[in-house]
Amino acid sequence: MVFADLVYFVQEGARSIRHNKFISVVAIVTIAFALMIFGAFLIVYTNVSHMTEGWVRQVEVTAYVREDFDPDRVDEIKKILWENREISRVQFVSKEEALARFQSGHENAAYLLDGLEGNPLPASFEIGLSKSARSQGAVDQLVRKLSQIPDFEEVQYGKEWTRSLMTFLNILRLIGFTLGGLLGVAILFIIANTVRLTVYARRDELAVMRLIGATNNFIRGPFLMEGLFQGLIGAVLSLITLFGIYHYWVPKLKHSAGVLLMQEISISFLSISMLSWIVVAGMVLGFFGSLMSLGRFLKI
Amino acid sequence: MIRMVDVYKRYQKDYSALKGISLHVAKGEFVFITGPSGAGKTTLLKLIYCEEQADRGEIRVNGLNLARLRRGSIPYLRRNIGVVFQDFKLIRSKSVFDNIAFALRVIGASKKEMKRRAWDVLRRVGLQHKINGYPLRLSGGEQQRVAIARALVNDPVILIADEPTGNLDAVVAEEIMEILNEIHMRGTTVLVATHDMNIVERMNKRVIRLENGRCVSDSALSDVPASGSEVVGRV
Ligand SMILES: Nc1ncnc2c1ncn2[C@@H]1O[C@H](COP(=O)(O)OP(=O)(O)OP(=O)(O)O)[C@@H](O)[C@H]1O
Ligand SMILES: [Mg+2]
């Protein structure tokens, strides 16, 4: 394909969109709407998974030592722990620190300890896990192993909690795939239909092109461009709208969510790479939607 | 240049538009195909540029066996054949210039080339002044000339004209034939389907007559076999 052909395809594709303004606008807006739904979902998904990833990172194994544990042996135990490759961080929390933490975390509830003699909180090792070890199976295995160390009274980790979090994320991902698939198919058909209408309106011209020696690819070119443009414009439009909504709503949402969770949360917009993926998806869907509608019209 | 051997074509089950056509047109010849309406003239021409496929028989155009031609090669065959269609087939939304330039655009000519050749060919058919006109605002004769110009613009080796004088008055018809003759003089093989016997007689060229899907006479042959299923024309 010559460069001049490409220029011609682009010009003709754009001309066709301008020429069929109404139907093109309807198609573009519909595509924009579909991609916007998907984009909104992506924002929710990435933020939720980003946020929870932070939580998962906090999930760590806590090994409580026996009451008679000799604090001089901390380094020795640390060394044993470090032999496990899954472990990325080890911190010893003495009885005193545990108490201090408890007190600072429950200032209003300090009375809970009032009736007790001495310090009832056990010392512990807080063990962070490397990323690769964060699967359920790996965690289980590590915990079983650590439980064999005689100095440990009990080895704990947030099993139920991580599991349901993972399940939740998986469900979210599944919804995303389904939604993306359905919306993708919808866009494919929207574009196929609009392009089919333009093809139909210009079928005489196409017949002439064929008879004066145009190749099928040459005849297709402008329509593929038309579909591609519709997808592209639809995608860009969806992202602009989405950003507008994000810009307007997120500060409010952040505020109320912050109040609710008693924690500063950050909600980020789609990353540059995701933005470009949506645009590319729009273009690809436009291209193939158009190709779909051309098949039966192009016979010599 | 064009050779047909025992060619059959039917559109409907029980009716054949062509029944055993055999002919040979040499390079640089000018041939009239005549015959009453429905004789199969247009069908014969369509087979040559592959708008229709023969059911039986062999067709060779410019050395190519059409039955063996891949679909993808048909456009390239057509670029060597200029066709003036019975109904012109001009694109209504394009100007005269664009209609002609389009035939060049389709084969990937440069802008400069398009301008030069479109202009050149419009001068040959005497229509420079209508270069910006639109087909629907042209007279029949003018549309015919645009159609001829478009057929010529790629410098085809074969020019096919289907009823080029169809509904034109005698004077304009004469002018059109003059243009076709000039194209022939430049070495192009020209095939003209017409039932205008006045013109055929005046031009004094080879005439192949079809009737009812058969070749009934060929002025290039002294003796004409009664059956159309034998080789009828050879020059
Ligand atoms: N696409 C088609 N489908 C069905 N029948 C057709 C088709 N084209 C032509 N025919 C039939 O084939 C026969 C030959 O038609 P053709 O167009 O070749 O005649 P012609 O000699 O060109 O006539 P005219 O002088 O009126 O143009 C006619 O009987 C016509 O009805
Ligand atoms: Mg005809």
Image (cartoon, coloured by chain):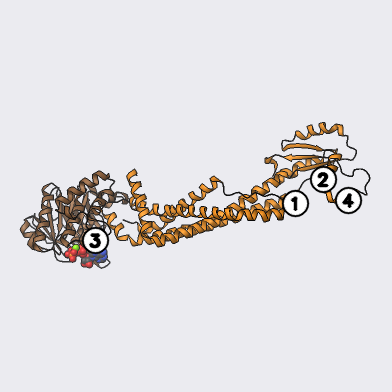
Chain colours: A orange, B brown
Q: Nearer the viewer, mark 3 or mark 1?
A: 1
Tell me if I can see residue A42 in this picture. yes
Q: Amino acid at mark 1?
A: Glu
N-terminal-most mark, 2 or 4: 2
Q: Name the chain under label 4.
A: A
Determine the secondary structure under disc 3: strand
Q: Is the residue marked by circle 3 packed among few (<14), some (14-19), or many (20+) residues within 10 Å?
A: many
In space, the residues marked 3 and 1 are separated at their CA atoms by: 78 Å
Q: Is residue A155 found left or right of A136 in the rendered image? A: right
Q: Amino acid at mark 4?
A: Leu
Q: Which mark is residue A104?
A: 2
In space, the residues marked 2 and 3 are separated at their CA atoms by: 98 Å
Q: Which residue is mark 1?
A: A160
Query: x, y (%) of residue B127?
Result: 16, 54
Q: Which residue is mark 4?
A: A112
Q: Are marks 2 and 4 on the same chain?
A: yes
In space, the residues marked 3 and 4 are separated at their CA atoms by: 103 Å
Tell me if I can see residue B1 in this picture. no
Q: Name the chain under label 2.
A: A
Q: Amino acid at mark 2?
A: Ser
In space, the residues marked 1 and 2 are separated at their CA atoms by: 27 Å
In space, the residues marked 4 and 1 are separated at their CA atoms by: 27 Å
Q: Name the chain under label 3.
A: B
Mark 4: C-beta under 8 Å from nearest atom of ligand 1? no
